[in-house]
Amino acid sequence: MAPDMQSLLDRISAAMQRRTDRGAVASYIPELGQVDPDQFAIAVATADGKLFHAGDALTRFSAQSITKVFTLAIALGRAGDQLWNRVGREPSGTAFNSIVQLEHERGRPRNPFVNAGAIVTTDELLAGREPKEALAEILGFIRAAAGDDDIHINKAVASSETRHGHRNFALANFLASFGNLKNTPEKTLGTYFHQCATEMTTVQLAKAGRFLIGADKGPSLVSQGRVRRLNALMLTCGHYDGSGEFAYRVGLPAKSGVGGGILAIVPGKASVAVWSPGLDHNGNSKLGTEAMERLAREMDWSVF
Ligand SMILES: NC(=O)CC[C@H](N)C(=O)O
């Protein structure tokens, strides 16, 4: 029999709070470098409408690359399959901010979850509009998915990344040089940095992921066929060059962010969010991954 969810989350949270080997907080965005690493949260939103959480689950954190799932859903809704002319669907095997592969493959990023691919997705979503309008659409989508309007963009984080985002500027200029950017690098990146600076609590993130559970659970924001494809991309590309390892250890589609969050989907059953700011060598939450591994094992959750 499956264990009682609340006591399981309490046990996982207590074990993680005690840990001292927490990984390293991302410091290449200075504002994120100030986050206290001694935090942990986990939240589960089930297909039948229940919500469980433990730890610092009501503390806001920077969603960062997890927002790429939401912008991909919106961009596919706007552009349809044409988006795939500009970005691929293969795992990268390289770091999230790698430049080498982009040159090799002539400006068509491997997938929408590495930075170059997410910059193209955001560029598509902009569609000649002002960044403010595109950002309002992104926030509107996330709020509708979470059923919660109290989700905002942290402008200090966005400007911190703008000042130090030299690699992302390099990627955007590279994309432009191959003709794979419709807006200026500054405009697309300004939108991308603000999108990444969206803050959520772990509870809000678990709720925002419900539309990916499928089987008509949660707010129906995208079609069931698209839900399956978003999950396929999360499974194969959601953890960058750590995607194979995450699939092996956890066995669920998931997307990580350098803020230390992970959104994982148990198709037909639940949306799970974990947060712990310390990262492993691939830039994915160290304790977040361990907590997901334990939750999936104890609940007997896997897509395999
Ligand atoms: N992996 C991430 O979360 C990276 C997002 C971050 N905003 C960046 O572009 O570098």
Image (tube, rainbow, N blue to C red):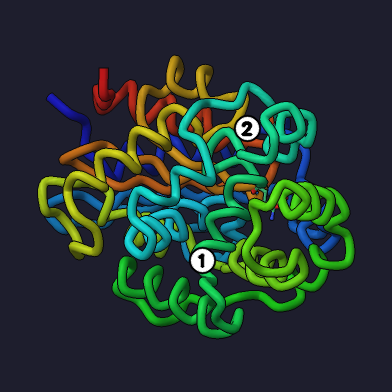
- Location of residue 197 (image quadrant): bottom right
Q: Residue at x 73, y 69 (%)?
A: 184
Q: Quadrant of the N terminus?
A: top left
* Residue 280 in view here: no
Pick the residue in front: 7 or 206: 206
- The image shows residue 97, relative to residue 190, as above or below, that is above
Q: Which residue is mark 2?
A: 286
**Can I make out residue 68 in this image?**
yes
Is the residue at mark 2 in contact range of ligand 1, meaning its CB lies under 8 Å from it?
A: no
For residue 236, the mark is: none
Q: Residue at x 17, y 28 (%)?
A: 2
Q: Residue at x 55, y 65 (%)?
A: 59
Amino acid carrying mark 1 in the image: Met
* Crowd rating for badge 2 (residues with CA inside 10 Å; few <14, some 14–19, many 20+): many
Q: Under tag 1, what secondary structure?
A: strand
| Residue 25 located left or right of residue 150 | right
Earlier-in-chain disc, 1 versus 2 = 1
Q: Which residue is mark 1?
A: 200
Q: Indicate whether 173 appears above or below 93.
A: below
Where 88 falls versus 160 (above or below)? above
Q: Quadrant of residue 240?
A: top right
Q: CA distance from mark 1 to mark 2?
A: 19 Å
